[in-house]
Image (tube, coloured by chain):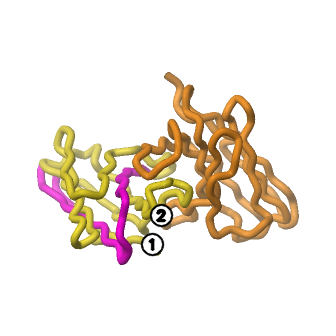
Chain colours: A yellow, B orange
Amino acid sequence: QQPVQSPQAVILREGEDAVINCSSSKALYSVHWYRQKHGEAPVFLMILLKGGEQKGHDKISASFNEKKQQSSLYLTASQLSYSGTYFCGTEISGGGADGLTFGKGTHLIIQP
Amino acid sequence: DAGVTQSPTHLIKTRGQHVTLRCSPISGHKSVSWYQQVLGQGPQFIFQYYEKEERGRGNFPDRFSARQFPNYSSELNVNALLLGDSALYLCASSLSTGGQETQYFGPGTRLLVL
């Protein structure tokens, strides 16, 4: 079942913060976050495994709430380069054989 | 190190034709997955191969097939093309299988079916 991402789109000024959510109706083994710019391949940001954790590098971090089966991606002090479409990909079994199931994406536009 | 490479970058075919897309994974990666991404949507899983064996298949018709070679490169074949097959086809490689493995995507092959 496809995870639900929210919001669908967000427009920010440079330096503002953003939160993107990814919710699943099924118990998740892992959540993978990617950013895709127009006409390019998805670029890996981070992976979170079940057990509830938070990860981050630079000004991008993420959390995984196992109770709610929800992951959130946090972008702080956004930069112009953060613009793009953010996808969460979820994996249920842990075996990997079912691939990742991606949400419809969140379009992020950063304005100067 | 070279990332995932795919060829060709663009392709135009007509309905009913057959197409073969190619992917070379990151050096050392033994698993290749194929995804279809239609405009405005997230990638949709087609196949996963590991050590030359099919490990997983998504909800796609039998017109779609794939294989992995001893050097871990992979081909995706689509027969009897339909207009709805027009999409960006992405290949992703990972060290092995498993939900904890990071999948790295290639630049994709953009297929247009007329």
Left or right for B81, reference B33:
right
Q: Which residues are magenta?
A: A12-37
Nearest the viewer among B70 and A106 is B70
The residue where tag 2 is placed is A101
Residue A111 seen anywhere in this rendered image of the structure: no
Determine contact: label 1, label 2, CB under 8 Å. yes
The residue where tag 1 is placed is A2
Decide: is A97 above or below B49.
Answer: below
State the CA–CA distance, disc 1 to disc 2: 6 Å
> Is disc 1 in the same subunit as disc 2?
yes
Q: Quarter of the image containing the C terminus of chain B? A: bottom right
Left or right for A50, reference B88:
left
Left or right for A80, reference A33:
left
Q: Quadrant of residue A93?
A: bottom left
Residue at the image point whose x is 33% and y is 45% from the top: A45
**Residue B68, x across and y down, in percent:** 72, 41
**Residue A35, x across and y down, in percent:** 37, 50
